[in-house]
Image: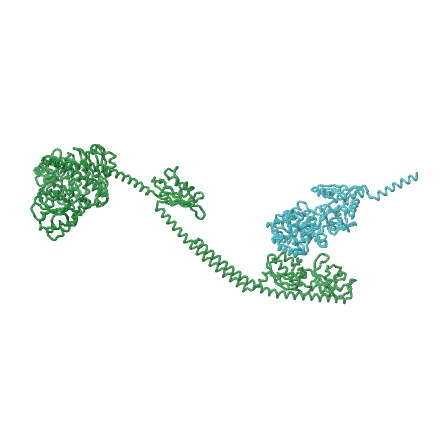
């Protein structure tokens, strides 16, 4: 409504201005007209007063003429020719038609003596009788009409006719000529009329056609009856007047004034245009100028308003264009389709251009025919479409539907929610269709459904797990409880006690691993797991893995091999602990589910790096174990999943190992895949990307000292791998696939003066094995060249024989340049090579004997167990109930009293971390050096990290693994002893 | 016996005397005319009267209208012409050897009884009275609605200038001044041309000898210009080009048109009274800018011409004298609406319009000359050509040229001398 008023305002202003201009112009025009009328009245009055005087003079002169005619006739003593002579004489001057002598019998004779009938009316004779001049219209015998001026003269007799008056006749034309009333250049009419309007004389050139001018005005003018009556009254009352009226479509002035004869009236009709033609030019110019000014002002106003409108229109159009542009851009950038349909014929007024991108329909085709969209619907024949829906849309209402559409070019499917709005635009019914892309929502719904299903599945798995765990927990618990009872019963039987104790311990360990897995999984699932990225050595990692897995495989007489393909970098940035966990999990499972005498291969392959300074490695664990069913493979990474069969039922497991592995791989941004055939074995592949660590380049060290190496291994690919790795360091490598070839090459080179700097020999080779080959080489070329034995077996088994054969050191497989450097460094510096790492089973020196431990433990039972365990190794303990007490005890103790502090973490009053920090901050020398080990059920990596950050030296997980604890404590004590300079 | 013989001789003498006194009693006179003309009631009546009165017999030779001219000419030229030939004084009569074939009747006693108009019609350029006019007649002029004109405060025109003023004044009153039924109008122009050829017989003779053309007479172009101007001024109304003969009566009786150029008997044959009746009309001259005072066209009169070469010429003259007897022509024309040919004609019905305008008619009436006596004149052709001008296809000057062209062409086709 406001908008309409706003739009109407300029139009209203124009109309108002125009109306004002017209009103002012009309008022001014009226004023001017009145002025003109006033001036014209004066002007006309002057003119026709003069005309009236002229007419009176004309009549008077005729009176005199007739009187002189009478006198002349009288003097001629009845001479007939006298009249004729007189008439002839005067006609030339006066221009009349004829002269007559009027007889008493009503007839007359012309000047020529012809008898004539003038047709004078009785009242004319009356007038003559009263000695008056008579002016009258008359008809001659030939029908022609004349105007007669008659005047009584002295009666007489002419040629026998008795006359008493004389008359003179004029035709109208002659009379007009004689009167010479030519006001206004002959454009005016002038009449002498009777009071009733009858025309007596017309001065109009050419004659007279008016019988009665009043009657004529009645039919031909716009005068009203009352005005006509007024005229009649004026004329008969011998009044003067001026009237303006329209006659025959033209505006005329009527001017009338009485004539002094016979109550006649002089009437003049003057066209207004003729009168106004004499109007002051100044006034006309003034009128023109004012009119022009009005026109100019009005035109200017109109132009201003039109310009204003134009600007607004342009602005509106620009805004509209912007909006359209914005809408087009918007519609292109969104996945919603907008359509506007005209109800008349369902023609498409607008369709967003993104229809081509979203549905694969050419824009022009969709614009031309809305049905083109139908083609895209899935189930095209059955589903509703925008057009089909139109009729069902209520007025000013809307209707929605959901439908899946297929992209016509790519076949991609998208879900759309369509809504049709029916609305009226400028009295035209329009439909607006909005097709909103709901694909993501649909996918989300699908994912949620899947997630729900997964959750349900997980929940179900958890239920199953709990059921299993109930069994798995109860089984070792039952063993612990049961064997504890038996232990009490058979306490006096050492063999039984030993047997029961071993079984209780085994059950406890199983229970512990079960709990650890559950907790680990719980933490991963809660998203609290984070990676501790640091530089680590791939060779060391593989070495450690070999140390852990080899015994397990050996125990089951399985063939376990670690190999490296390509030349993977040795120093990497990553979470070594988690990577280790992943590989150990896979290998543990391989060992676990591969029967005795089976084969397990662990391969590390270098893949093309995804980016500079990055390395991509593939870890493959392949076994020929029991394999898995397809169903199980599909959910192997789901938590709490375990294959159920006769074999697996006999194998203890939590069902969380692979789920944890999968989550850790995901956490590290890697991919884990599994390929398994039931009964044939499984292959797990893990691909991970690591950043390269900037550490000392082992290759450059080696390059400065070694130029030629001989590698001998019966497996050629190992030789080639070694050659490739060394070639990167610029070292020339010869390979030999057996001992004899190796020997020959070594001898030949030596003899040629190009002896090898290092010789690598595989231990187990067909024919000559490594030891034998080494012995022959030593015999041939002497002891100068370092000979290393390559083996994935335990060095301790062959060390004695190897050293006797002249082998300098052990080189574990897989081969790494850095490992080679580590092995060669002592040889080139004349230092003895470091002893190989001992296997876990190797016996440790008892460093606990005689040591005093400060144990902070709020749990009495745990404290007692720990005390007893340490006592078993000859150590003593002093107990503190919490961190505060431990702090106080340490602070109060003499320096060096305690050899080590074992600190629980979660304790009342002061926790382990706080206590450790407090101890480390004490101002005494041993506060900084005394080993402090955390003993806590908080076993995650973060816990370890927190412990170290608090100043602790190590972390021991509860429940305490006695062997691990003893090993750790021994190491800590050894380190401490070293720092203190003790000889351990 | 002598007495008997004397008686017989006396009786024979009486018989002879009676026979001679009756002059040709029982004689048969051949009268040749158009079949339709001879069938007129007044003609039949006079024939019967004559035969009854005289015992003579009128042998009527009735010729089909279309064959009349050829047959009559053939008979007259063969020397075996009829005793009396009925013919109009028109251009066709010029083919006959008028002076050698027909008696000059100007010496007859009944000549003085003829009206001036009738006498003028029957007189040729040599002053010979060619025949006895015995026909119904009318006066063509400008018939106007006098009642209406009076109510408008106007009076009839007496000059061309007044007529023009009158037209303008009538138009100003919102009425059509002149009813001009252009579609089929074939008579208007001849009214205008009559003064040029009736008043100046030399013009007629020259044009019939092809010595002058219309274009040599400036009045004709003036006439054309006036007609064109009148049309432009709206004096003929707005739809006059599609108005025909049937449109005249409604226009006049309703008062939508005030004047028309027609003849008085039309009011008794074709006019259907409406708002106005015949009594509301009066007559004034036709003004078509060819003569300032206006003109009336006298009637075309069928004349009974006596074959001077006939053996029964005297008897034929006697028959004409019989017809010219007041009792006889009054008996014949009793009740017939016609303008009188004889001054003593009293039983015919003569319109008031004509009698009222008698003085004017007497002064301004012309013998119907153009239409009847100009060789090659075609009323329809003239009307058609004028219409072309009114439709804007011809200028007034071109109109005159085309009128000449068609006239000369027609005359040539007729084999007229000089063309």
**Chain letter matching colour green:** A
Q: Where is residue B216 in the image (x, y as percent from the top left)?
A: 65, 53
Residue A724 visible, this angle: yes
Q: Position of residue A588 (x, y in %)?
A: 18, 37
As displayed, is residue A132 above or below residue B79?
below
Q: Position of residue B128 (x, y in %)?
A: 75, 50
Q: Tell me if A333 is positioned left or right of B5 in this view.
A: left
- Residue depicted at x 58% and y 65%: A39
Q: Where is residue A810 in the image (x, y as percent from the top left)?
A: 11, 40
Task: Identify which residue, A944 or A120, lies in the foreground.
Answer: A944
As displayed, is residue A633 above or below residue A82?
above
Q: Tell me if A545 is positioned left or right of B96 in this view.
A: left
Residue A185 image-quadrant placement: bottom right
**Chain letter matching colour cyan:** B
Residue A618 image-quadrant placement: top left
Residue B381 visible, this angle: no
Residue A757 image-quadrant placement: top left
């Amino acid at each position: 409504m406001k908008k309409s008023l706003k739009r109407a305002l300029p139009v209203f202003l124009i109309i108002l201005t125009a109306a004002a201009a017209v009103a002012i112009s009309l008022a001014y025009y009226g004023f001017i007209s009145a002025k003109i009328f006033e001036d014209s009245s004066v002007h006309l009055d002057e003119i026709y007063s003069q005309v009236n005087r002229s007419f009176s003079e004309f009549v008077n002169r005729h009176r005199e003429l007739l009187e002189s005619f009478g006198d002349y006739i009288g003097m001629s003593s009845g001479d007939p020719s006298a009249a004729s002579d007189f008439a002839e004489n005067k006609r030339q001057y006066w221009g009349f038609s004829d002269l007559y002598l009027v007889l008493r019998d009503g007839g007359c004779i012309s000047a020529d003596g012809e008898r004539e009938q003038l047709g004078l009316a009785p009242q004319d004779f009356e007038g003559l009788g009263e000695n008056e001049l008579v002016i009258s219209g008359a008809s001659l015998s030939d029908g022609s009409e004349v105007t007669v001026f008659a005047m009584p003269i002295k009666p007489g007799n002419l040629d026998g006719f008795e006359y008493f008056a004389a008359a003179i006749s004029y035709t109208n034309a002659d009379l007009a000529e004689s009167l010479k009333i030519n006001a206004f250049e002959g454009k005016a009419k002038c009449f002498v009329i009777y009071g009733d309007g009858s025309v007596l004389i017309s001065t109009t050139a050419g004659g007279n056609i008016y019988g009665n001018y009043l009657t004529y005005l009645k039919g031909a003018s716009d005068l009203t009856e009352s005005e006509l009556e007024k005229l009649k009254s004026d004329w008969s009352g011998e009044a003067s007047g001026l009237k303006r009226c329209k006659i025959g479509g033209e505006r005329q002035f009527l001017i009338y004034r009485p004539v002094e004869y016979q109550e006649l009236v002089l009437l003049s009709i003057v066209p207004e245009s003729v009168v106004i033609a004499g109007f002051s030019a100044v006034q006309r110019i003034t009128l023109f100028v004012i009119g022009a000014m009005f026109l100019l002002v009005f035109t200017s106003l109109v132009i201003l308003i039109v310009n204003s409108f134009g600007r607004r229109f342009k602005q509106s159009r620009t805004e509209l264009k912007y909006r359209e542009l914005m809408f087009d851009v918007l519609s292109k950038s969104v996945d919603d389709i907008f359509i506007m349909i005209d109800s008349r014929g369902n023609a498409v007024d607008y369709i967003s251009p993104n229809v081509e991108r979203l549905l694969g329909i050419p824009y022009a085709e969709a614009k031309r025919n809305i049905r083109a969209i139908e083609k895209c619907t899935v189930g095209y024949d059955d589903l509703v479409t925008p057009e089909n829906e139109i009729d069902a849309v209520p007025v000013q209402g809307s209707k929605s539907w959901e439908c899946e559409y297929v992209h016509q070019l790519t076949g991609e499917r998208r879900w759309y929610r369509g809504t049709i709005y029916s609305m009226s635009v400028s009295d035209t019914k329009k439909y607006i269709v909005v097709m909103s892309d709901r694909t993501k929502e649909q996918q989300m719904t699908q994912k949620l459904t899947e997630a729900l299903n997964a959750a349900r599945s997980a929940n179900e798995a958890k239920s199953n797990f709990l059921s299993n765990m109930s069994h798995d927990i109860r089984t070792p618990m039952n063993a612990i409880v049961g064997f504890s009872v038996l232990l009490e019963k058979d306490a006096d039987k050492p063999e039984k006690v030993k047997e029961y104790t071993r079984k209780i311990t085994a059950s406890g360990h199983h229970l512990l691993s079960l709990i650890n897995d559950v907790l680990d999984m719980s933490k991963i699932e809660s998203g609290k797991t984070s990676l501790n990225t640091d530089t680590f050595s791939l060779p060391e990692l593989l070495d450690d893995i070999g140390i852990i897995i080899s015994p397990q495989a050996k125990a089951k007489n399985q063939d376990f091999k670690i190999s490296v393909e390509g030349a993977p970098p040795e120093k990497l940035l990553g979470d070594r602990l988690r990577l280790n966990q992943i590989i150990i999990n896979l290998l543990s499972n391989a060992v676990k589910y591969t029967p005795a005498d089976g084969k397990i291969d662990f391969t590390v392959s270098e893949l093309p790096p995804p980016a500079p300074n990055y390395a991509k490695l593939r870890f493959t664990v392949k076994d020929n174990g029991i394999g898995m069913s397809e169903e199980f493979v599909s959910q192997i990474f789901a938590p709490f999943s375990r294959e159920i069969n006769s074999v697996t039922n006999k194998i203890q497991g939590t069902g969380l190992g692979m789920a944890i592995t999968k989550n850790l791989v995901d956490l590290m941004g890697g991919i884990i895949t599994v390929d398994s055939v039931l009964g044939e074995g499984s292959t797990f592949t893990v691909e991970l990307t690591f950043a390269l660590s900037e550490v000392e380049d082992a290759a450059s060290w080696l390059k400065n000292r070694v130029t030629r190496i001989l590698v001998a291994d019966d497996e050629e690919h190992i030789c080639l791998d070694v050659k490739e790795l060394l070639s990167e360091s610029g070292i020339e490598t010869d390979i030999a696939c057996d001992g004899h070839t190796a020997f020959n090459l070594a001898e030949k080179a030596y003899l040629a003066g190009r002896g090898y700097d290092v010789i690598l020999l595989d231990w187990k080779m067909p024919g000559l094995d490594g030891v034998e080959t080494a012995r022959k080489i030593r015999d041939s070329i002497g002891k100068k060249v370092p000979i290393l034995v390559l083996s994935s077996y335990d060095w301790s088994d062959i060390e004695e024989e190897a050293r006797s054969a002249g082998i300098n050191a052990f080189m574990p497989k897989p081969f790494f340049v850095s490992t080679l450097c580590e092995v060669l460094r002592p040889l080139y510096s004349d230092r003895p090579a470091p002893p190989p790492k001992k296997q876990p089973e190797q016996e440790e020196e008892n460093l606990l004997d005689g040591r005093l431990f400060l144990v902070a433990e709020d749990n009495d039972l745990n404290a007692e167990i720990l005390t007893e365990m340490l006592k078993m190794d000859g150590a003593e303990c002093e107990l503190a109930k919490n961190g505060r007490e431990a702090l106080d005890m340490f602070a109060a103790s003499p320096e060096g009293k305690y050899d080590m502090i074992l600190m629980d973490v979660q304790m009342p009053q002061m926790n382990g971390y706080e206590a450790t920090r407090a101890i480390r901050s004490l101002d005494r020398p041993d506060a900084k050096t005394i080993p402090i080990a955390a003993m806590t059920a908080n076993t995650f990596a973060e816990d370890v990290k927190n412990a170290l950050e608090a100043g602790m030296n190590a972390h021991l997980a509860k429940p305490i693994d006695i062997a691990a604890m003893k090993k750790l404590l021994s190491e800590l004590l050894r380190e401490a002893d070293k720092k203190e300079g003790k000889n351990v | 016996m002598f007495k008997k013989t004397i008686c017989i001789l006396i009786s024979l003498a009486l018989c002879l005397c009676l026979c001679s006194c009756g002059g040709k009693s029982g004689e048969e006179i051949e009268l040749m005319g158009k079949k339709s003309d001879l069938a007129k009631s007044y003609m039949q009546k006079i024939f019967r009267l004559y035969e009854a009165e005289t015992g003579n017999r009128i042998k009527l030779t009735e010729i089909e209208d279309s064959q009349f001219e050829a047959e009559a000419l053939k008979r007259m030229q063969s020397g075996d012409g009829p005793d009396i030939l009925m013919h109009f004084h028109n251009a066709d009569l010029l083919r006959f050897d008028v002076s050698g074939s027909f008696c000059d009747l100007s010496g007859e006693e009944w000549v003085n009884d003829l009206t001036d108009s009738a006498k003028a019609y029957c007189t040729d350029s040599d002053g010979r009275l060619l025949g006895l006019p015995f026909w119904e007649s009318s006066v063509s002029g400008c018939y106007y609605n006098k009642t209406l004109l009076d109510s408008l405060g106007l009076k009839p025109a007496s000059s061309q200038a007044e007529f023009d003023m009158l037209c303008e004044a009538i138009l100003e009153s919102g009425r059509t001044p002149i009813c001009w039924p252009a579609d089929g109008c074939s008579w208007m122009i001849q009214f205008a041309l009559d003064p040029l050829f009736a008043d100046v017989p030399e013009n007629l003779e020259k044009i019939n000898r092809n010595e002058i053309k219309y274009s040599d007479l400036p009045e004709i172009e003036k006439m054309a210009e006036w007609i064109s101007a009148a049309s432009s001024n709206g004096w003929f109304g707005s739809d006059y080009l599609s108005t025909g003969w049937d449109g005249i009566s409604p226009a006049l009786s309703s008062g939508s048109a005030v004047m028309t150029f027609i003849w008085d008997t039309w009011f008794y044959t074709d006019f259907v009274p409406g708002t106005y009746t015949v009594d509301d009309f009066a007559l004034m001259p036709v003004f078509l800018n060819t003569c300032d005072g206006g003109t009336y066209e006298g009637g075309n009169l069928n004349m009974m011409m006596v074959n001077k070469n006939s053996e029964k010429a005297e008897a034929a003259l006697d028959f004409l004298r019989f017809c010219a007897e007041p009792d006889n022509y009054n008996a014949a024309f009793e009740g017939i609406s016609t303008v009188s040919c004889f001054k003593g004609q009293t039983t015919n019905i003569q319109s008031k319009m004509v009698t009222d305008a008698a003085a004017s008619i007497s002064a301004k009436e012309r013998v119907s000359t153009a239409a009847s006596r100009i060789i090659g004149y075609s009323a329809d052709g003239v009307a058609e050509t004028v219409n072309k001008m009114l439709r804007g296809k011809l200028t007034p000057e071109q109109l005159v040229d085309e009128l000449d062209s068609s006239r000369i062409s027609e005359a040539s086709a007729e084999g007229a001398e000089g063309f």
